[in-house]
Image (tube, rainbow, N blue to C red):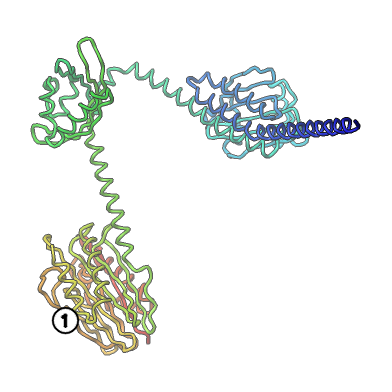
Amino acid sequence: MQAEPKKSLQNSDQQANLHRRIAELEQALAEHKADLNRQIRPKEALLEINRAVQELTRPSHLERVLQVCYDALHSVGLDFQGLAIHRILNEAEATFESYQFRPSRKIEVMIRTVPNIKRMWQSGRTSYRPDLQEDLGGMLPETLKALCERYGMEVRCLLDIPHPRGTLALLSTSPCAFSESEIQFVEQVSEVLSVGITRVEDLEQLARSQKDLAESRQHLELTLEAARVGVWDSNLTTGKLLWSDSVAPLFGLPPGTFPDTREAFYECVHPDDRDLVQTAADQAIKDDSEFRVEHRVVHPDDTILWIESKARLFHQKDGIHLRGTVMDITERKEAEKMQRVEDELKLAEEIQNSFLPSIPPDVAGFELGGYLQASGRIGGDFYDFIAFPNQNIGVALGDATGKGIPGALLIAKAQSVLRAQAQDTDRLSDGITTLNQVLSMDNEAGRFVTLFYAIIDITEKRLTYVNAGHAPGLLFQKNGMRQLESSGPPLGMFVEATYTQNEVSLYPDDLLMICSDGVSEAMDEKEAFFDEGPILETIQEYRAQSATDLARVICEASEKFEAGNQRTPDDKTVVVIKVDP
């Protein structure tokens, strides 16, 4: 009999604990919701302001944006009573259009000259005056007094935030009204408002443009004709085709003489583009979609122009119409073609530069350097340093016929094959013979490459070289200068050609200079060559410089030498090999 009261007490305790737990969970949930609301509400406020900005359709709607902005900022807990948007009208005269939202919720719009707002706007920095009673922050007392009278409130705190088209200002009767995070939030709002003001200005410009357009219909017709744009109407039911007078010249015909049938139109379209135009028209008719196609037309004198045709379907009582415009886009097509060429040139330039050594190799007992000065964006010269497993070094300098992309491709092919053959062939001459065979195959254009290729035996101080139709290498030694002459024709000319290799010993303080014909065949105004004499003088004067700098100096001296000659300049490349003293 006593167990029942005890059990009842236990149930009561459990219910109390349950109610307490539920209350705790409800409180935690409420706190979580409040925390989420604090995080989400600023984003919602920004969205509200942004929506108002996006709904702008005329300048007067900026007042509506100001109203939404005022309410949205209050909804996130900002402590302010006045709000103003200033839009710059004339920077030179510091003239602003001001939309002022006052505590009475009245919006006043005025245009005034405000130099202090201009200075703050030009600074591009947020201006925050937390307590104007303690520190005016550069504001004049009479300016503060006028501000308080205009808003009908005692302004204690002022926040000014510039944006590209003006400023946003918040005024509060409380000192230190805004925290750092709130200021950052208002800066985001200012950016959104800037979009709205720009939109207003665009709308104003559009209104002015529409007015000008309405007043200039006749001028517009003349402009369309000058712009080579025409209007057409094709009745798909009757087959009748109508054109504006400005269309005929686009097809090379006198005004008003363009044929009125679709068949005659297709006769003017380039034969290779007729199927394209017909397919686009059929698809537009089938899908009731826009007809848009770029195609060529052929004039009676065989001149070819590019035309863009655009049209839409219209269902009329007299049949289905395809109405649209034609526009001469020849200049645009040429510009696109030029841009493609420019892109290809840029890519070829980057590829060619990637083949050049970034820095010369560090070789014990020797100093190597090279310099290439292309006459155009893409040159026909190259030089290379090839390292071997036995520490020997290959040195190459080549010159291809032609410039631009064909010459660059030939150089890239020659350089790639040369590197492969250098590692796989014991005899230098065998590798060059193989390279010649590769370049001779499928060489219908008859292009060729002159090449000076040498291997430096680091241990034996010996230079083994092959000169394939290239300018002689100049070896300067203590007992004089020696020319390392050609030992075979240029590569790619004769598939059966063979090449012999030669050797020369190197001694301390020797210097070998290899150059392309752009250097050795440079001519002055008297048609004298920049040959061994000028080269020797340049080397004697600048020999103390590094190998790379000396190579550059020789190229520059050659360029200066031919300055008075009107010939088209050639690529200039120099490689210098110096033996340590």
Which residue appears at 21% of the width and 32% of the height? Answer: 307
Q: Amino acid at mark 1?
A: Thr
State the quadrant of the N terminus: top right
**Residue 30 at x, y percent in the picture:** 71, 31
What residue is pinned by disc 1? 500
- In which quadrant of the rendered image does the C terminus lie? bottom left
Q: Residue furthest right?
A: 2
Is residue 454 rendered to the left or right of residue 90? left
In the figure, residue 250 lies in which quadrant?
top left
Q: Position of residue 21 (x, y in %)?
A: 77, 34
Residue 483 to residue 76: above or below: below
**Disc 1 crowd, CA 10 A, few/some/many (<14, 14-19, 20+):** some
Q: Hey, which residue is sitting farthest front in the picture? A: 1
Tell me, yes or no, if residue 226 can be seen here: no
Q: Is residue 445 left or right of residue 187?
A: left
- The picture places residue 186, in percent across and down from the top left corner, at 62, 33
Question: Residue at image x 52%, y 18%?
Answer: 60
Residue depicted at 9% across the width and 36% down the height: 302
Q: State how many labels appear.
A: 1
Q: Secondary structure at mark 1?
A: loop
Does the image show residue 428? yes
